[in-house]
Amino acid sequence: MLRQIVLDGKTLEYELTRKRVRNINLRINPDGSVKVSCPARTSVAEVERFLRSESAFIFRSLAKVSSRIDNAARPSTYEDGEQVKVFGELCTLHVSPGFPFKGVRYSYPDIYVCSDSPEKTQRLYEKWKRQKLRDKVSEMLEYYVPMFERKGVKPPAAVAFRTMTSRWGVCSPSTGKITFNYNLFETPEELIAYIVVHEMAHFLEANHSERFWAHVEDVMPDYKARRKLLREY
């Protein structure tokens, strides 16, 4: 159930769910939505007292979410003039049904989409974006896989892509499959490279132990700086 509360003079919308939990729980999602779960018999007044006590944390978290969204600059309207990022570089969408080509053309810092509606623009842009990321990851795997082969790691048996809300990549050592997040498209190339190395290292250590990070550092000595920058997205 969606509800609203005024905290520090600001109206906050949150989704309240009653379930079999022992305490009131708060979660700020990557898209900025606020989720609250509570025991079945907890009153709305109790929930609101809890939210007021956590107001500083809530708004601090929402500010970080907003900063990440702005930094990523993913398209939202798919209209002419909208600014987006391509591998970390700010570009401008140019949309018109009159361009003498079909689909999408890219010449930094401009992206040209031959389209007569936001819906068509979104479809064409997302198809182009996904192929560009697949090509970029393939290029980076070609570069980094040999470094891991020298450590006894086989090339990935399968490479997949999907949109994920909380992870940049997933490695399944048991199947040899790595899945990458389509949202990597907006991040700088050096951060995509970090995710490639990070996931490949999981074929050696299926955890985040000291040995895992040692393997990452051996291949990418500056991984800490890249990992820190990735948090901004």
Image (tube, grey):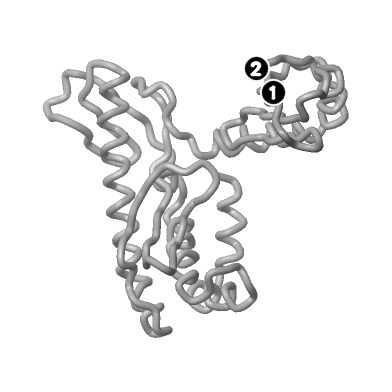
Q: In the image, 44: left or right of 180?
A: right
Residue depicted at 39% across the width and 36% down the height: 91
In the rendered view of the protein, which quadrant contains the N terminus? top right
| Nearer the observer, 49 or 137 | 49
Dot 2 corresponds to which residue? Answer: 2
Residue depicted at 55% across the width and 60% down the height: 226
Q: In the image, 215: left or right of 200?
A: right
Asked if the residues shown at circle 2 and circle 1 are in contact, with their CB atoms under 8 angstroms apart, the answer is yes
In the rendered view of the protein, which quadrant contains the C terminus? top right
Q: Secondary structure at mark 1?
A: strand
Amino acid found under the numbered disc labelled 2: Leu
Disc number placed over residue 70 in the picture, else none: none
Disc number placed over residue 16 in the picture, else none: 1
| Nearer the observer, 25 or 164 | 25
Residue 50 lies, in percent from the top left, at: 85, 28
Q: What is the quadrant of residue 117 in the picture?
A: top left
Residue depicted at 81% across the width and 19% down the height: 7
Residue 41 lies, in percent from the top left, at: 81, 23
Amino acid found under the numbered disc labelled 1: Leu
**In the displayed structure, would residue 70 be above or below residue 174?**
above
Q: Secondary structure at mark 2?
A: strand
- Upstream in the sequence, badge 2 or badge 1? 2
